[in-house]
């Protein structure tokens, strides 16, 4: 479809459906205005949960063992640090330190009392562990290894409690106590526990709690294994509910106003164009559009060709519509030929020639409005009638010239006779 045809069709559509199109444009303008109003003119709010303070505390164990006898691998006095296992004969004493620190976004002042003890016990543990109160403890024996109390512990300060355990002696004592109970069914365990008591304030909130940290020592054949879960961290936060305005998204903030402005401008443009007659479509343009639609519909029946200026069979019969010409082509089993130069459509029969001259738009060439044919293009006589050759024109001219010369000769004879008398 050409640009010119597209423009004519747009004008025809707007002229025919002007009121519905105008209504749609105005509705879009109202929608854009409503969205813009909702984005800027309302006081919409929402409730958010904001963090106003937070804290985090950490308790951890470090440990080491000193070699007491020279060996091919270690010398006496060598210190093995933070190993998962130590040798009971080579490094019988486990030394360590428990450390506690905390941070608080709103500050804090805590009194901390820490006590580290050696725990010997026999117990069975079920799923969920000791923290959830699961399992059975048959007996328990505690020995304090060290304690420390600090008043006014601030965020970032560190409390340390050192300890030292002779693991070989603890294992021997564990066996003796268990024998006194007649060998209990539970597992014999050696642990280092630090019980921490906290009082004071943190982030402006009162604190009063107790927490226990554990370091397990497993007894094996000639070794003991230290099970350290790593630093144990607790944390919490303080929040508050706040009301904040709802910020419009990009679609509402810019899309709504833009839609309103574009729609109103389009409505105004349609109104001005209608009042000035810019949307009106002439009867000739409507005929041309109808022809173009019909031409596209029957395109399979039409072949574009350069028709020679030669004699055509029989009389030329003009068909009123393109549909009629296609019907003739179907009846005569012929193709519809469209002259490439003039645009005239032709069907050649055995003794007749059927033609259809399509309508044209004003200013089209060769289908101009002032052409000799009803539909534009060259006169049908020039398309279908043969023209004379140059030789035939010369012969006619000579014959006419001879006819014109005879009266002149008679006049000269008469003149001579008159002069002789």
Image: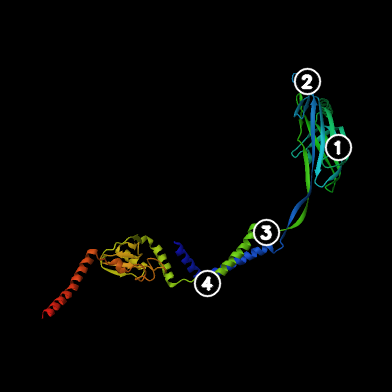
Q: Which residue is mark 4?
A: 274
Residue for badge 2:
75
Query: Percent x, y for residue 318?
Result: 32, 70
Q: Of the residues under marks 4 and 1, which one precedes in the sequence?
A: 1
Q: Between marks 2 and 3, how big is the CA–CA gap?
A: 73 Å
Instruction: Give the foreground label among 2 and 4.
Output: 4
Which mark sits nearer the N-terminus, 1 or 3? 1
Residue 6 percent location from the top left of the image: 46, 64
State the residue position of label 3: 248
Labels 4 and 3: the sequence-earlier one: 3
Q: Residues within 10 Å of mark 2 (few under 14, many from 20)?
A: few
Label 3 Cα crowd, 10 Å radius (few <14 / some 14-19 / many 20+): some
Tell me what residue is drawn at x 80 percent, y 43 percent. 103
**Callout 4 secondary element:** helix
| Disc marking residue 114 | 1
CA–CA distance between discs 1 and 3? 54 Å
Tag 4 and tag 3, C-beta contact below 8 Å: no
Which circle's residue, 2 or 3, is located before the other in the chain? 2
**Which numbered mark, 1 or 3, is in the foreground of this view?**
3
**Circle 1 SS class:** strand
Q: Left or right of 265: which side holds 339?
A: left
- Looking at the rendered structure, the number of numbered marks drawn on it comes to 4
Marks 2 and 1: which is nearer the front? 2
- Residue 276: % across, % down: 52, 73
Proximity of marks 2 and 3: CB atoms separated by less than 8 Å: no
Viewer-nearest residue: 165 or 138: 165
Residue 255, image quadrant:
bottom right
């Amino acid at each position: 479809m050409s640009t010119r045809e597209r423009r004519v069709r747009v004008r025809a559509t707007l002229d025919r459906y002007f009121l519905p199109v105008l209504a749609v444009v105005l509705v879009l303008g109202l929608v854009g205005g409503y969205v813009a109003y909702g984005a800027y003119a309302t006081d919409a709010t929402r409730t958010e949960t904001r963090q106003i303070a937070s804290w985090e505390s950490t308790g951890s164990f470090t440990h080491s063992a000193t070699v007491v006898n020279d060996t091919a691998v270690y010398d006496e006095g060598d210190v093995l640090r933070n190993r998962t296992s130590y040798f009971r004969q080579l490094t019988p004493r486990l030394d360590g330190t428990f450390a506690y620190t905390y941070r608080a976004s709103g500050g804090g002042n805590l009194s901390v009392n820490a006590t580290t003890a050696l725990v010997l016990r026999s117990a069975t543990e079920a799923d969920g562990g000791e923290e959830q109160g699961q399992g059975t403890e048959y007996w328990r024996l505690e020995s304090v290894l060290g304690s420390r109390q600090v008043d006014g512990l601030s965020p970032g300060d560190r409390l340390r409690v050192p300890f030292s355990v002779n693991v070989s002696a603890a294992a021997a004592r564990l066996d003796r106590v268990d024998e006194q109970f007649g060998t209990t069914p539970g597992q014999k365990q050696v642990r280092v526990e630090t019980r921490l008591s906290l009082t004071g304030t943190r982030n402006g909130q009162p604190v009063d709690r107790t927490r226990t940290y554990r370091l397990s020592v497993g007894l094996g054949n000639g070794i003991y294994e230290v099970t350290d879960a790593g630093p144990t961290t607790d944390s919490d936060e303080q929040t508050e509910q706040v009301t904040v305005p709802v910020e419009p998204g990009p679609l509402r903030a810019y899309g709504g106003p833009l839609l309103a402005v574009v729609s109103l401008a389009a409505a105004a443009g349609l109104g001005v164009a209608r009042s000035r007659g810019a949307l009106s479509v002439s009867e000739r343009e409507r005929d041309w559009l109808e022809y173009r639609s019909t031409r596209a519909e029957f395109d399979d029946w039409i072949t574009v060709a350069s028709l020679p200026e030669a004699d055509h069979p029989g009389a030329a019969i003009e068909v009123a519509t393109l549909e009629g010409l296609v019907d003739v082509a179907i009846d005569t089993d012929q193709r519809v030929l469209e002259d490439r130069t003039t645009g005239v459509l032709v069907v050649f029969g055995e003794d007749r020639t059927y033609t259809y001259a399509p309508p044209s738009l004003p200013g089209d060439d060769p289908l101009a409005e002032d052409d000799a044919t009803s539909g534009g293009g060259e006169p049908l006589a020039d398309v279908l009638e043969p023209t004379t050759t140059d030789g035939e024109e010369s012969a006619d001219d000579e014959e006419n010239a001879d006819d014109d010369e005879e009266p002149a000769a008679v006049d000269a004879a008469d003149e001579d006779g008159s002069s002789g008398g």
